[in-house]
Image (cartoon, rainbow, N blue to C red):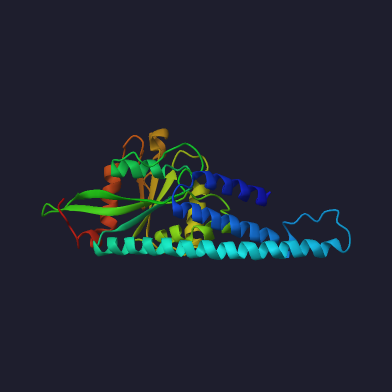
Amino acid sequence: EVADRTRIILEIFKKRAQSREGKLQVELAEAQYETGRLVGGRGVDMSGQGKGVLGAGEAVANTQRKAYKRKIGFIKKRLIEVKQTRVQQNQNRRQEERPLISMVGYTNAGKSTLLNALTKREDVVVRDQLFTTVDPTTRKIFLGETQDGGRQFAFLTDTVGFIRKLPHELVDGFESTLDMVATGDLVLMVVDASDPRRDQKEQVVLDTLDRIGSKVPILRVYNKVDQLAEADRKPLPDTVWIAAEKGTGLQELKDEIKQRVKPLIEKHSVTY
């Protein structure tokens, strides 16, 4: 059952990935998954085989393991090249002294919709389905004006959606993307506020952040509040209530982001 679930997730990721990095990450996750199935001879159909044939099955598994090991090594080298480009991009952004903000959340929480709303663009695909976002997307967002007439910006990155019991192969495969979360200045944890299982899914995201070693401050963003009764929108610490599709609460969110990253954005104000 677990194997089938992982395979289904991998197939979805393969269909969604568009960028070179996204495709490489999915290939890596798939190769690691297949290698794991071969440990101890698993993954090779030996049912009904008699004595003596088992050795042949182990030999096949060993050959397959070596092939996957070579493939994994090749993919990791390519990902290192991609990561170096990403690191350089982040260094360039750091030189601008603008905050680096990542959005995380359970799949289908509305992260891509929020990215489009905050950047006033519509080029990030938004669909009501699992794992719409596989390729990370970074945009510059306008936070407001400074007292001297400058304009304050930050960089915002949309990341892959999390799920319950996210297969470790996917976490490992998407390490180069997820390390952006762990090395940024602020994490926006987007939550579907109208979801009956909101608390459980929120915990999944927190557990995944802990799993990747992120110590970055978190701001909870409760999305889709237009689908909630007013009485259910209770004030909560470190939380902003929005409806990204309707544009509700976006200014409040920007104001809260500015307060969180104020020491950084005060260092660098550029008028465009």
Dividing the picture into quarters, in which one does residue 169 lie? bottom right
Q: Residue furthest right?
A: 51
How many numbered discs?
Answer: 0
Q: Position of residue 27 (x, y in %)?
A: 55, 55
From the viewer's perspective, is residue 27 above or below residue 248? Answer: below
Q: Does the rendering let one see residue 182? A: no
Instruction: Say which of 41 and 102 sits in front.
Output: 41
Q: Could you tell whether 141 is left or right of 146 in the image?
A: right
From the viewer's perspective, is residue 121 above or below residue 237? Answer: above
Q: Position of residue 20 (x, y in %)?
A: 45, 53
Instruction: Say which of 92 and 207 sits in front.
Output: 92
Q: Could you tell whether 168 is left or right of 64 in the image?
A: left
Q: Could you tell whether 269 is left or right of 127 in the image?
A: left
The structure residue drawn at horizontal position 31% and vertical position 64%, both measured from the top left corner, is 91
The structure residue drawn at horizontal position 26% and vertical position 55%, both measured from the top left corner, is 259
Q: Position of residue 65 (x, y in %)?
A: 67, 64
The structure residue drawn at horizontal position 47% and vertical position 36%, both measured from the top left corner, is 128
Q: Does the rendering let one see residue 50? A: yes
Q: Could you tell whether 52 is left or right of 65 in the image?
A: right
Q: Position of residue 247 (x, y in %)?
A: 31, 37
